[in-house]
Image (tube, rainbow, N blue to C red):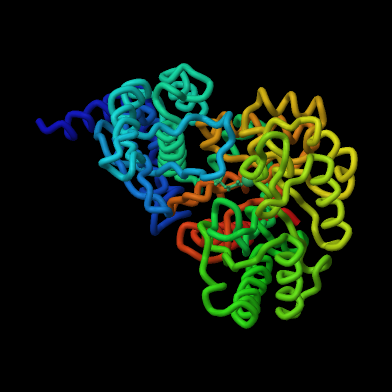
């Protein structure tokens, strides 16, 4: 007798022994009447979750390239589903340039004959030989448990054994795999993880994008010390309109820059923003304000301004080199920011205004500007709850920039988001300057209810894919009546 015939025989025997045949007949007849075209498809979907839960079979790492032509770690997740091992999902880690000293360690080979020392073969090896066995047999739909196993396999806070790049790629890939196996969109799966399966909100909101349209600092090649000049559309607009507004301003800015500085002013920096030959922030903000008007919008009403100074990059020996050879003390720099806020009333957010360890200046900036604008901590917090709890107690900032690869796993980054929300601060989910074409952070922003997302200019595939993913999510939420009113 074939295997299936013997299973059918066992089912019949069970039905007869328990006198269940008549009840089953009624159920099947009803189902066929209600769903004549797909009664058995429906039954299969009901019965599938009763099968043994999926298990991770293995993780497979590989070296791929990021958006800056540097190697990064990609991870494939294979899971055993109904006795068969199959490839379920894959994802890859992003990489920063202006990194905080407390970030999870990015493990690079240091072999100058390959990719100028930036190869990630050792991190890939660690995926295959350390992380894969550590998570084998775990249920990929339980992201918190898998992330915990990933952290334990490393055993250090900053992931110095296995590499933060290996761990972030694995966490991203397992999140994707879990969503696919649960047949849920990633943001819904991540929302269940964020709310720990309890009280997951019934509706979702889309974040407001902080769009980096003019690049300086380490992300561009000019004299502009401030790294990011961003625009934020009015928070009350639908996401589709937010994206249209900022994109139109982006195009107008390109035109203005070309007419003022020549065609090369339209060259792009690492995050897709223009990298023109400007010397100071005042000039850059002025150009953006002109672009906002040229696009037919009003600065301070339709569109707001934001900066990421990434000031640890121009801080040395107690001074800030705000322009080439122009050094300011912390207090002078705070005066400079205050003047920018007064001269450009649409300016509503400043990130990393001070060096990552210049805590006294962080506190002073909160006293002076904390009621007016968002003061965002990136390098100062590195998405690390130890630093964040100190920063919340000592009032360093009122917003957290959340970057998963600064700490390692999605679950650890979620801990930081929860902590900031409990302190009534804002959370900005962020990309890195070196990116890949996955859009996990878009789903993560929606899942956590973060009010903001920072993911570069509306140009270049690795940035645009995040915005496009938010368009898809918005459409789905509208269709399902799940968009927060
Ligand atoms: C940032 O500083 O906020 C940023 C996105 O840049 P990087 O990834 O280089 O740290
Ligand atoms: Mg930053």
- In this rendering, does residue 449 appear at all? no
In the displayed orientation, state which residue is furthest to the bottom.
259
Residue at image point 31% right, 45% down:
115
Residue 37: horizontal and vertical position, in percent?
39, 59
Quadrant of the rendered image containing residue 376? top right
Residue 377: horizontal and vertical position, in percent?
70, 39
Q: Is residue 36 above or below residue 333?
A: below
Which sits in the foreground, 242 or 393? Answer: 393
Report the label total: 0
Residue 99: horizontal and vertical position, in percent?
56, 39
Residue at image point 33% right, 33% down:
109
Residue 252: horizontal and vertical position, in percent?
65, 77
Q: Quadrant of the N terminus?
A: top left
- In this rendering, does residue 302 appear at all? yes
Residue at image point 42% right, 54% down:
67
Which sits in the foreground, 442 or 32? Answer: 442
In the displayed orientation, state which residue is furthest to the left.
1
Left or right: where 169 falls relative to 386: left
Q: Is residue 348 above or below residue 383?
A: below
Q: Is residue 92 above or below residue 141?
A: below
Q: Is residue 245 above or below residue 147?
A: below
Which sits in the foreground, 118 or 30? Answer: 118
Left or right: where 363 falls relative to 376: right
Q: Quadrant of the C terminus?
A: bottom right
Which sits in the foreground, 354 or 181? Answer: 354
């Amino acid at each position: 007798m074939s295997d299936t015939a013997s299973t059918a025989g066992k089912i019949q025997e069970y039905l007869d022994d328990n006198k269940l045949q008549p009840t089953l007949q009624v159920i099947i007849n009803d189902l066929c009447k209600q769903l004549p075209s797909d009664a058995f498809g429906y039954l299969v979907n009901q019965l599938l979750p009763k099968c043994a839960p999926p298990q991770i079979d293995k993780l497979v790492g590989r070296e791929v390239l990021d958006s800056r032509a540097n190697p990064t770690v990609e991870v494939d997740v294979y899971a055993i589903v109904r006795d068969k091992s199959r490839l379920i999902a894959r994802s890859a880690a992003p990489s920063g340039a202006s990194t905080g000293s407390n970030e999870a360690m990015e493990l690079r080979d240091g072999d100058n004959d390959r990719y100028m020392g930036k190869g990630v073969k050792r991190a890939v090896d660690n995926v295959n030989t350390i992380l894969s066995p550590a998570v084998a047999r775990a249920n990929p739909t339980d992201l918190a448990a898998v992330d915990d196993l990933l952290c334990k396999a490393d055993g250090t806070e900053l992931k110095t054994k296995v590499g933060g790049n290996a761990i972030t790629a694995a966490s991203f890939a397992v999140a994707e795999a879990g969503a696919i196996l649960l047949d849920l969109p990633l943001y819904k799966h991540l929302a269940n993880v964020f709310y720990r399966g309890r009280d997951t909100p019934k509706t979702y909101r889309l974040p407001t994008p902080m769009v980096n349209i003019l690049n300086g600092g380490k992300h561009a090649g000019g004299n502009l010390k401030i790294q990011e000049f961003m625009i934020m559309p009015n928070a009350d607009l639908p996401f589709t309109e937010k994206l249209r507004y900022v994109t139109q301003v982006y195009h107008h800015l390109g035109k203005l820059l070309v007419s003022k500085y020549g065609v090369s002013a339209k060259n792009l920096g690492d995050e897709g923003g223009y990298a023109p030959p400007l010397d100071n922030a005042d000039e850059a903000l002025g150009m953006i304000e002109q672009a906002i008007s040229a696009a037919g919008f009003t600065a301070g009403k339709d569109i707001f301004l934001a900066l990421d100074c990434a000031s640890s990059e121009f801080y040395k020996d107690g001074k800030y080199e705000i322009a080439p050879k122009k050094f300011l003390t912390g207090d002078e720099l705070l005066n400079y920011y205050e003047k920018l806020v007064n001269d450009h009333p649409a300016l509503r957010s400043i990130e990393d205004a001070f060096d990552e360890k210049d805590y006294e200046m962080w506190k002073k900036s909160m006293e002076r500007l904390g009621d007016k604008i968002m003061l965002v901590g990136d390098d100062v917090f590195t998405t690390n709850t130890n630093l964040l709890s100190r920063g919340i107690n000592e009032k360093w900032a009122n917003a957290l920039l959340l970057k998963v690869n600064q700490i390692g796993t999605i679950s650890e980054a979620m801990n930081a988001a929860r902590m900031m929300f409990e302190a009534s601060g804002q959370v900005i989910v962020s990309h890195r300057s070196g990116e890949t074409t996955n859009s996990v952070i878009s789903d993560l922003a929606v899942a956590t209810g973060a009010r903001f997302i920072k993911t570069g200019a509306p140009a270049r595939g690795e940035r645009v894919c995040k915005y496009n993913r938010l368009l898809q999510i918005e459409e789905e939420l509208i269709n399902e009546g799940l968009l927060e009113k």
